[in-house]
Image (cartoon, grey):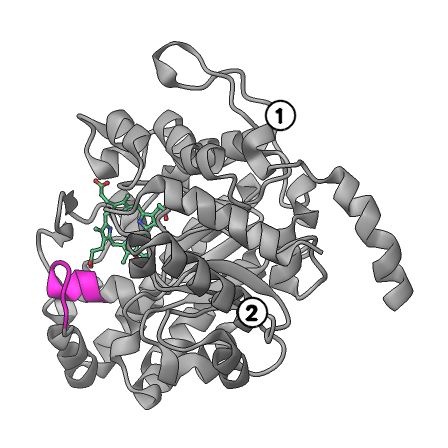
Amino acid sequence: MWLVVQMSIPTRRRALPVTGARTARPRAVPGGRLGGWPAVATAAGPAVDSDLVRAARGLPVSRTPVWFMRQAGRSLPEYRALRAGTAMLQACQDPDLVTEITLQPVRRHGVDAAILFSDIVLPLVVAGVDIEIKPGIGPVVASPIRTVADVDALPPLEPDRLDFLATAVRRLVGELGATPLIGFAGAPFTLATYLIEGGPSKEHARTKAFMYAEPEAWQRLLERLAVSAATFLRVQVDGGASAVQLFDSWAGVLSATDYATRVLPHSRAVFDGLDASGAGEAMVPKVHFGVGTGELLPLIGDAGADVVGVDWRVPLDEAARRVGPGYSLQGNLDPAVLLADRETVDREVRRVVEQGRAARGHVFNLGHGVLPDTDPGVLTHVVELVHELSAR
Ligand code: 1CP
C-alpha cells in the first residue's frame, strides 16, 4: 500500500494544474458571457483525481484542498456587477449567469473546487412554490405551510423542468477541467424551516411545533422534500458534478434525539435516493453540513456522508473524535476571523490546518458562509496560505 502511494503521487502531481482552475479560464464573449462549450464531461472526468475528491475519500493529497461556502456572491464586486438588475432566483435559472458566477471565485481565488451558483430553495421554486429571495432578508414564502392540507398541496419536482440546470452543470464541468464542481441541495429539515416559518427565523419555533404536533404530516413533508433534493442532486451528478453537499444549515437547533428520530432518516433518504438513481456508476463523495451541530456530530455522518462539515464551534481534532473513523472533515475557520487583522487570520488558518490533520482527510473551508463584508483579497490569501502550509 505504502509503495503504491509513493509511486502514484509524483505522477498525479504532474497532472495537476499549477493553480487549480486558473488554467480553466473561460473564453470571454461580448457582454461578459461565455461561449463555445466543450463536449459533455461525466462524473468520472478529470476532476475524479483532484485533491478535493481524494481528501473526501481519505486518500493522500498533494495539499489540503480549500473552497469557501458562499464563495460565489456578495463579497465579490464582479458578482454584484453581473447580478445587477436580475432577481436572485431568476439568475439561478439562467445557465449563462450560473456558469459565469460559479467560475468567478475559482478564477479569482484559485480555490480547489467550484460550488454551483444556485440556492437551496430553487427546487421548490421550479416545482411551483411561490418563493422570492428578498435582498437583505433571504427566501420568503408567499403561503407558508401551516396545515396537513398544505403539505399535501406541495407540488412535486418534475425532473424535466431542470434542463437549465443540466445545461449549466455540463458547461461548467467542461470549463473547469480538472477542478471539481460541487453540486448541492438543501436538506429536508432546513427546507421545511423556510416553508413553515415563511422565511428566515432564529428560533424555528413554528417548525418544531409542527414537528411535534403533526408527526404524520411532518414525515410526509420531509419525505417529499427528500425526493426533490435527490432529484436536484441527481441532475447535477449526471451533468458531471464531482461531489455533492447537503446543507442542513439549521439542524443544530434540534436535540440529538429529535434529530436522530425525526430528521436524520430523511437526510439519509436523500443520499440513498441519489445512490439508487445512479446505480452502477462510481458514486461521487458526499458532504453533510450544518451549523451548531456539535452535539449532532456523531450522527451527521450516519446519514451516508463521506465528509462531515463542521462549524467553528468545535475544533477539528475534537470533531474527528466525535464523528469517529471513516469520515473526512470539512471546515472550520470562523468566517468572522476574516474581518480581523492579518496576524489573527494567519494564526487561525494555521490552527485549523494543524487540527485538521487529526481527520482521515481534511477539506479546508469556513465554519459557515463567507460574510458579505469580507475583503476578497483575504480569501485569496487564505487559499495560498492553506496550500503553502499543507504542501507535501
Ligand atoms: O442577491 C443575493 O446575492 C442573495 C444572496 C444569496 C446568494 C449569493 C442567497 C440568498 N443565496 C445565494 C447563493 C447560494 N445559496 C449558494 C451558492 C453560492 C456559494 O455557496 O458560493 C449556496 C450554496 C446557497 C445555499 C443556501 N441558501 C443555504 C445553505 C448555506 C448556508 O448559508 O447555510 C441557505 C440556508 C440558503 C437560504 C438563503 N438564500 C439566500 C439567503 C440570504 C439565505 C439565508 C437566509 C437565512 O438566514 O435564513
Identify residue type, mark 2: Glu
CB at mark 2 closer than 8 A to ligand 1? Answer: no
Q: Is residue 201 magenta?
A: yes
- State the SS at label 2: helix
Residue position for label 2:
354
Tag of residue 226: none
The amino acid type, in three-letter code, at marker 1 is Ala
Of residue 43 and residue 320, the one placed in the foreground of this image is 320
Quick check: can you spot residue 65? no
Q: CA distance from mark 1 to mark 2?
A: 40 Å
x, y percent for residue 234: 50, 50
Q: Position of residue 351 (x, y in %)?
A: 49, 68
361 in relation to 377, above or below:
below
- x and y, in percent, of residue 378 in the image: 38, 46
Q: Quadrant of the C terminus?
A: bottom right
Picture layout, residue 266 above or below residue 382: below
Nearer the camera: disc 1 or disc 2: 2
Against 279, residue 58 (above or below) is: below
SS for callout 1: loop
In the picture shown, does residue 377 fall above or below 83? below
Which region is colored magenta? 193-202
Which residue occupies the foreground of this view, 8 or 376? 376
Count of numbered circles on the image: 2
Residue 335 among magenta residues: no
Instruction: Examine the rendering and report whether any part of residue 60 can be seen.
Output: yes
Residue 39, which numbered label?
A: 1
The extreme top residue here reads 30
Horizontal placement of 119 versus 44: left or right? Answer: left
User: Looking at the rendering, which quadrant does residue 348 occupy?
Assistant: bottom left
Q: Residue at x 41, y 66 (%)?
A: 289
- Between 107 and 124, the one nearer to me in the picture: 107
Q: Quadrant of residue 346?
A: bottom left
